[in-house]
Amino acid sequence: MCLNIGRAHACLNLKLQEELGAFHGLNYEDFTLLHRLLGAEGGCMPAADLARSLGLPISALIRKMVLLEKTGLAERTAGTDGDGLHAAIRPGGRKLMQAAVTTVEAICADAVKSLAPEGLSQINVALLALCHDDTPYA
């Protein structure tokens, strides 16, 4: 079963990579990073929390943030009261994400259209349990 989950993820990831790249100039990993920031209070969160939520070491997150800063989509900031490095989405990132979220929602709706609607919430709960996390991406 886990291999089928991995295969389904790979197929969906490939489709998302293709569409996000073609229409928005984003890869899926950058989309997920920006999506987490978009959903964070004030569009900003501690870098350590963001890295953990994305399953990245902090060094990999910093490398991604440098690239997103160069394109004006996100920025690194000092936390308030000296609580470490934070990541924040910039206005250009918010604007790009409005369109990108619409694309991703359409792809995801198409991906699950053959599944019984009444079973989707159970599938979602099961997937979150596999992540050992009860915080959905929204």
Image (cartoon, rainbow, N blue to C red):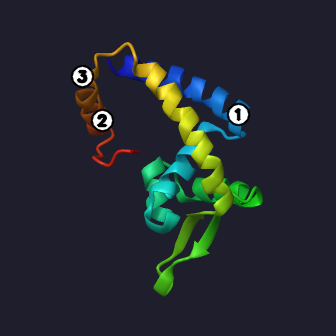
Disc nearer the start of the sequence (2/3): 3
Disc nearer the start of the sequence (2/1): 1
Q: Is residue 46 visible?
A: no
Give x and y (percent) for residue 131: 33, 40
For the point 52% across and 49% down, which residue is it?
35
Question: What residue would you read off at disc 2?
Answer: 130
Q: Which mark is residue 49?
A: none
Disc nearer the start of the sequence (3/1): 1
Could you tell me which quadrant the N terminus lies in?
top left
Going by the numbered disc 3, the residue's amino acid type is Gly
Q: CA distance from mark 3 to mark 1?
A: 31 Å
Question: What residue would you read off at disc 3?
Answer: 119
Give x and y (percent) for residue 20: 65, 34
Q: Residues within 10 Å of mark 1 (few under 14, many from 20)?
A: few
Question: What residue would you read off at disc 1?
Answer: 23
Is 85 in front, or is 26? 26
Marks 2/3 in contact by CB < 8 Å: the verdict is: no
Going by the numbered disc 1, the residue's amino acid type is Phe
Of badges 2 and 1, nearer the viewer stands: 1
Q: Is residue 87 visible?
A: yes
Secondary structure, mark 3, is: helix
Q: Where 30 sits versus 113, above or below?
A: below
For the point 61% across and 42% down, which residue is it?
99
Q: Residues within 10 Å of mark 3 (few under 14, many from 20)?
A: few
